Structure formats: structure tokens, C-alpha cells
Image (cartoon, rainbow, N blue to C red):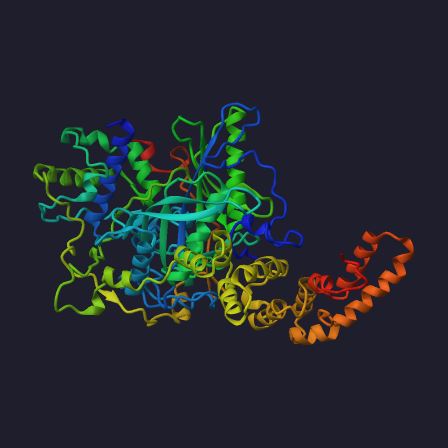
Amino acid sequence: MTPRNRFRWRVMRVLALCRWLRGGTVRALRLGAAAASSAPPSQVRQRLGPCRAVPCRAVPCHAIRGGNGLSSPVCALLQDSVTVEVLDHLERLALVDFRDAEGVERLREAVRFAERLREVNTEGIEPLDSVLEDRCLYLREDDVTEGNCTAELLKNAREKVEEYFVAPPGNIPLPELEERDTFLKGS
Amino acid sequence: MAARGCGGVWRRALQRGPGGSCSASRPRRAVACNARGGAVPVGQSGLAPWVPVVGLEIHAQITSNSKLFSGSQVQFAAPPNSLVSFFDASLPGTLPVLNRRCVEAAVMTGLALNCTINKKSLFDRKHYFYADLPAGYQITQQRVPIAVNGSLSYSLCIDNKMSQMVTKTVRIKQIQLEQDSGKSLHDDARSQTLVDLNRAGVGLMEVVMEPDMCCGEEAAAAVRELQLILQTLGSSQAIMAEGQLRVDANVSVHHPGEPYGVRTEVKNINSIRFLTKAVDYEIQRQIKELENGGTVVNETRAFDSKLGCTVPMRDKEGKQDYRFMPEPNLPPLILYDAKSLPANVNHQQVVNIDWIHERLPDLPSVKRAKLVELYGILPEHSFTLVNEDGLMEFFEDVVKRTQMKPKKVIGWILSDLLSHLKQHSLTANESPISSFLLADLLNLLENGDISSSAAKQVFEELWKGEGKTPLEIVKEKQLELIQDQEELEQICQAVIDEREKEGDRRQTRVAAALEASGLGALPSALLSCSCGGLWR
């Protein structure tokens, strides 16, 4: 595996794990607990919550294994895999905020925790990607049953113009590591 | 206004009038597709030839009453944010519920494109941030789409004279169901974007074509054929002007025998005509860039229709990492066929591939073949008939009502009627001359009541749409053929008397013939006229 592939594969693993453990989606613009952040409004990011103690399931997680299905490196190298590069990439992609060393350590613990799944031999077993896989996917009839609630939807919008939502003009990407005021620069 | 129909190459030959609504003169291109179909473009300096490679990603909006995962209505041009449910606005606590009609539409399209329908397909999330994607991800089918490995056959002319049509095939990599995003209106003056979520969540079929095409014409022909197929199936109305059919082109160039070059993606193509221009421009740009020693960057470019060129798109932050993950809220989509259909099942909950297959309508290629067989017209003619909206039905109506042979009717339809329609940018349904009137006119011609030049004059009159019938116009303008023998003799004699002094029999004969036919006499009637042995 080339260094570049290894990097991407680790990122995939870490991201999927973060999502799995936190049990919710990363929403870049959700204010909530991050209200105390001093970052400018256009860069509101999500603070990583505490790592929940979830009983370990012997479930081969397809996403954790990574896209190309190659075998994993040894656990001992794990500490080195969560590098500043990876953290910067994660911050940029998912707009999460590794505010301090505690946040990064939490991530390392989570990855270490998930690595234990590799002790399970999953040769020749179909990956499980949803616990719903034996359920029937319900098919809805093609009828119009919703809509027409413009006023309600716009109630939560901070700014609106004639029933349109207002957004900044295009994406504002996170500045480069050197230009950001972030803890990551020091580590 | 959006170009209705194809890239314009094969219509031009049949127009008698000037240019028509499509680009009249082909710009000089250094790319030409040779007869065998491979492109042999010549570089500026005459060095090794370049092979352009064009692949298309087409998004077709599914024609359905409600959206793919929610019950809000699908409608073009409604008040902003009025067709949005809580799920479309991605408010917490909402879940996707799949629309059965969208599944059926995708299966129909897959079957029409000769695809293998995957009996088990999965949904995934594709993450990226943009204001018109409120959830931050789009539900799509990346790993196992609903249909794979199909093919699309299309025809195009290899020369400008529309005399030789060649059939090509492009492989379809996959067809997948996915959600549409909302619409952003950019207000640069106030530095803000206005977001309308009416379109967010509408079902799309993404048709991914393999890079088997080599120039703008082929891409346009393929898209036009796909448009006709979708419209025939009813799975999508595929009107590019309303955004129901969106095409992104992936273009690269390389030398024969070498690996594929770096590709760029061209977006913002709003009509089939622009598709041809955009692809050709991009091929030229890449060739020029590489011949000047530069490199092609893997980027996304937008087509500027006013300038006729592609420009790099702003707002692209390097290569996107979409972080695909399985959609946790949707179980796999299982489709059945006659063999695997379980007994005692609720039919509303089941999509049967074989049932859909039996009910597929005649595809355009089948329609064309039937026209050729039924009416004995050329394949090129049937191609145009099927290609133009409503023209086939018009032709069949006329044939029904007239005694004239279809092979002659087709000439009138394709040369006279179509050229007039194109000049005024009308479809066959909007023609001022109805099929009744045209049939009446052709009957007059067929019965020998008028000559063909007179018929053309009547046609022009009818085009004005003043409500007169062909017979009325003929009487008004006295265009009837002179059948009366005596009258003919009188005319000939008058001319002979005038010209006899000059003594040249041949000249007199010609003059008499011209005079008589100018008054509407048929040559056959003249021959039987016995004016002083003039014709012997």
C-alpha cells in the first residue's frame, strides 16, 4: 500500500469510527454545545463529544475496514497514524474542532478501541452494513402528502428574503493550517 | 431558447431555406470523426494525432407526483420553499421513505438500456457541504446501484449531406437512484445566496456512460437518443431547458496507444447544441494546452454559453473526499422477477421486473424500424421523423388521408414542412398547416388537378394560416391545370403565329411549351395537342 493509500484508508477508518461512536451525524452549522466557541460564525464547528462506553460487538464494520479491503497494519503503529496531517484533514472535511489535547486523545482512544475488532476472524463473511438488512424496505405510493409549510420552515431561519433562505455566497473553506488559530499547530 | 432536437447536423441537409435556427455554418474544427468512427484530429503543428475521449454523466429527473424519499410535490416553478417537507429541509427526527414510482421508473430505464437489474441494491450517503444540500449529504447508490452494464445505440451522419448514417454504441456503466439538491440563486450584488429547497429531494436517475465517445457530435447524438427513450418510457420528460435533464461531460485527450490523459469535467451545459460546442471547445483547449507544453489540470470547468468557451469553476477546494458510507436508515432494495416472486405478498410492496418488462412501450429504434417497414421510407427519413417532436404522428396522419404514396409524402414533410417549421422555431403540433390541409393539397396534386410548382405556391399560402382550404386557394389564384384540349391548341397556335416569322421551329416549340406550362398545362397534355404538327 502506498503511503498515500494508507493515509486515506486511515482517515476513512477514523471518520467512520467517529460517526459510529457518537451515534449522530456531524452537522457543520449546528450551534448547540459549541455556542461558547469564539470562532467566527462562518466557521462554526462541532466539538467532539465524550467517548461513550459502548459494549463491543463482534461485527465486522465495512466502513472501518476501508474501501480497498487490504489488511491492516499492526496496532502498535496506531499512535503514529493520528498525525497532525490527518487531524487537519478531518477538521477540513467534517468541520470538527479538535480543541485541545484531550480531544485528540479521545480520538486515539476511539481508534484503539475499534482496532480490537481486528482480533475477530472475518474471512469469507459478508460485511454487515446495516442492522436493517433483513427488514423489508417499505415502498410508498406516489401521492402528495406533505409540503406547503413555508412559514413554519422559515421560522427558524435567521435571515430570509421573500421566502428564500439566505446563505453566504458559496462555501468558505477552512483556512490552511498555518493561517488558522488552532491547537493543532502546536502539536 | 433551448434547442429542441439534436445537434443540428442531420437536419441541415433537408432544409431548403436559409440556415434555420441551428448554427448555420460549422466552425472550422481540427477534429473530424472519420468514417470508421475513430476521431482523427490533427494538431496545429501536424504532429502525432490526438484521440479525444468523452464520457457523460447524465442526471434525469424522474417524472413522479412526489419526491424520492418524502411526500412533497414535484413541480416546476412553484413559490419558493412551498413544496418542501420537514425531511427535505433535513429537520431532525425525519426519515426517508422510498417512493415506489421512482423505483419503477429506474427499472424501466434500465431495461430499455439493456442493463442488468440488480435484484439487491443499496443506498449510500455522499457527504459534501453546500447551502442547497441541507442535510450535508446526498442519499445515492454508489456501491451497488439499481442497474449496471447496459448499452445505448445511437445514429449520426458522418457527412453533412445526411446521406449516410452510422450506428454507434456507448456502454452504460450504471444507473442509480439519487436525490436532487435544492436551487441556489446567487446574488452577487449583496454577496449572498438565496436557497430554494423545492427541488431538494426530487428523484433523479443518474446514467453514467463509459468514455466511448470521441467528439461533441457523438455526445449530442447519444444524449438526444437517451432523451427520446426517456420520453417514450415516460420515466422522465427530459426537458433540458427546465433542468430535467442535466449533462456533465468528462473530456480528455491522449495519443493513440498511450494511456488516457487527465480529464476535466464540464458542467453548466443547458442544451444539446451547447453540449456539442462545450465538448468540442474543451477538446481543442486541451490539445492546444498540451501542444504548447502545458498540462491539463484535473478540474471542473463551467461552459459559458455566451462566450462559447469553458472557464474554471470557482468554489472548488481541490479533490473532494465524499466520505461515502452506507445509508443506515434504509434497508437494501430488493426487486423481484416472476421466478423469485414470493407467494402471498402484498403487491403494492413489490416491484416485479418481468411485469415492467412486459409493459415497456416501443422504443425509438423499434418505431423507426416499423416506419421503414410499413411505409417503405429510408432509415434516414424515419430517423428525422422520430427525432422531431410530433412529426411522426403528423406524417402518419397525412398518409392516412391521402392517396399519395408515403415515399412522396415524406418529401413534402421533410423538405417543405420541416424547413418552414425550423425557420419559425415551431414543432409539428404548432404547424399552421394541419395534417388535414396538407393531405387535401397532396390529393389535388396526386389527382393531377395542379402541378407541383402550383402546389408549392398553395403551400406557401396555406402557411399564412388564413383558414382557406387548398381548393379555395387554387380557385382564387387560378392555379388549376388546363385540361381542355381546345384551350391548349389556342394557346399554342397563338405562340406559333407570333414566332413563325423567326422560322426556328425548335425555338418556337420551346417558347410554346413554356408559355403553356406557365399557364398550368402538363407536358403530357401538350404532347397530345396537334397544333400544326409542331411537336413532331
Q: How many marks?
A: 0
Q: Residue at x 77, y 59 (%)?
A: B513
Instruction: List the single residue furthest toward the right.
Output: B501
A181 lies above or below B503: above
In which quarter of the view is residue A15 placed?
A: top left
B443 lies above or below A25: below
Q: Name the spot of residue B525 as percent of width and height, x first.
A: 71, 65
Residue nearest the viewer, comparing B242 with B471: B471
User: Quick check: B251 left or right of B205?
Assistant: right
| Residue B267 visible in the picture | no
User: Quick check: A61 left or right of A141?
Assistant: left
In which quarter of the view is residue A145 placed?
A: bottom left
In which quarter of the view is residue B324 placed?
A: top left
Residue nearest the viewer, comparing A72 with B189: A72
* Quarter of the C terminus of chain A within the rendering: top left
B501 lies above or below A82: below
B229 lies above or below A65: below
Q: Name the spot of residue B503 as percent of width and height, x first.
A: 89, 53
Residue nearest the viewer, comparing B295 with A87: B295
Q: Name the spot of residue A109 as percent of width and height, x first.
A: 17, 39
* Quarter of the N terminus of chain A within the rendering: top left
| Residue A106 visible in the picture | yes
